[in-house]
Image (cartoon, rainbow, N blue to C red):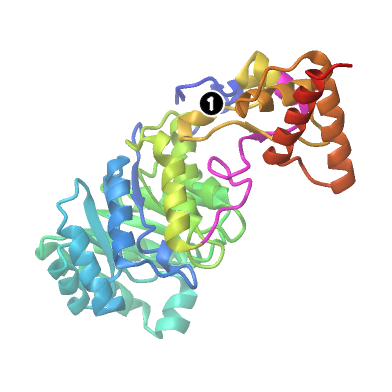
Amino acid sequence: MTISPPIDLCEWNVDEAATKGLHPPKEVVVVDCTLREGEQTPGAVFRREDKLMLADAMVAAGFRQLEIGMPAISPYEEETIRLITGRGLDCLCFVVSMATRDDVLRAKDCGADGIGLSLPSGRLQVEKKLGWTYDRVVDTAVELTAFAHEQGLRVTLSPYDTFRAAPAFLERYLTTVMDQGHMDRVRLVDTVGCAAPHAVTAMVAKMREWTRDAVPIEVHCHNDFGFGLANTIAGVMAGAGVVSTTINGLGERAGGASTLQVIAALELVYGVHTGVDIASLTDLSRLVERISGIQVQAYEPLVGPLTYQMETGSVLSGYFKDPAVAFPFPPALVGGKVTVVLGKKSGRQSVQFKVNELGLPTLGDAEIAVLLKRVKDHAEATAASVPDELFRQWVSEETASAGSPR
């Protein structure tokens, strides 16, 4: 296939031999499930007004499908879902439904456009958690998917813990629901984050075969081994047309694939269109930090508070000549901003950049040299960088000294 990213990142990314066997669609649907999976992060509780605000912000950013909650959790949650669906947002709103007719009807009553019917395929979930027979799982899935379709709901079959299902059973499960029930798409769920990228590639290929490419494959990957992003991308490269993700990677245990990272990788590395404004990613991340009370790591890809900071003088020197020397893409593309930290590794250009950044008076070479020595001495004595306010004080002292009679 031909990969055509909008910016020139790396020749190997688009090498014909390297991309042989990849089958990504030109467009991918992003189903953000922060309002459901994100709130399943232990200890996280989203206020109703915050859920409404986040739904509005995501739609404004270009998301066209959201998973907005689980009506079965509580009457309060049910009413919150009803308020979101009642806003007339320009997106499809899905909820997760338990395997009962009552819960399907509850989803319809909430005004949801569709459901994710959550019914496991993994051996441990079926035998240990539910204590069901495998025939009961299949029969229930057939009955409830057909029932939900009759109610006018879009149906995503979610045979969760997919990677720990016996292949023969999973094939029977999917083909039987295809033939006797109803599904508008099927979700591959790496419930405990145990799959590796090559396993996702193989599984998507098998699911496409079993469903005869008649319905889209959706991938929902957890991050227990740090594979959430890689597995999601592997699924898309194998032909999955839908991804299910959360902002800031929130979710159970180690969380899941980050919506922001998945979108940026698809758009900027692979040239796959998502319809989401990537310039909104940083603002969305900050909003979810505030709502959830969970901060991203300092060096979180794309949106970390320190991700676009520079200190080393030699790196900054290259940045001034061409920003691509230091960054794979312009940080402003995702709402980021380049800043400079003054410390042990700083150079003369670092000091000059900080002077300009803070709007301080123009300094001569001699003053820059004095300040650079003070920066390095301070960093080595305190094992810390120089705060902006302290640097302002030093500049004031140097400019006053330069203006005094000698």
x, y percent for residue 32: 36, 52
In the rendered view of the protein, which quadrant contains the C terminus? top right
10 Å neighbourhood of mark 1: few (<14), some, or many (≥20)?
some
Q: Which residue is mark 1?
A: 330
Task: Say above or below: 397 vs 168.
Answer: above
x, y percent for residue 396: 73, 29
- Residue at 27% from the left image edge and 50% from the top image edge: 56
* Residue in front for this viewpoint, 311 or 263: 311
Answer whether residue 302 is magenta in the image.
Answer: yes
Which residues, given as a range, are shown in magenta? 294-317
User: In this figure, what is the number of numbered marks?
Assistant: 1
What secondary structure characterizes most of the magenta part?
loop
x, y percent for residue 386: 75, 40
Farthest-out residue, front: 405
Please give left or right for residue 267 compared with residue 54 in the image.
right
Q: Tag 1's secondary structure?
A: loop
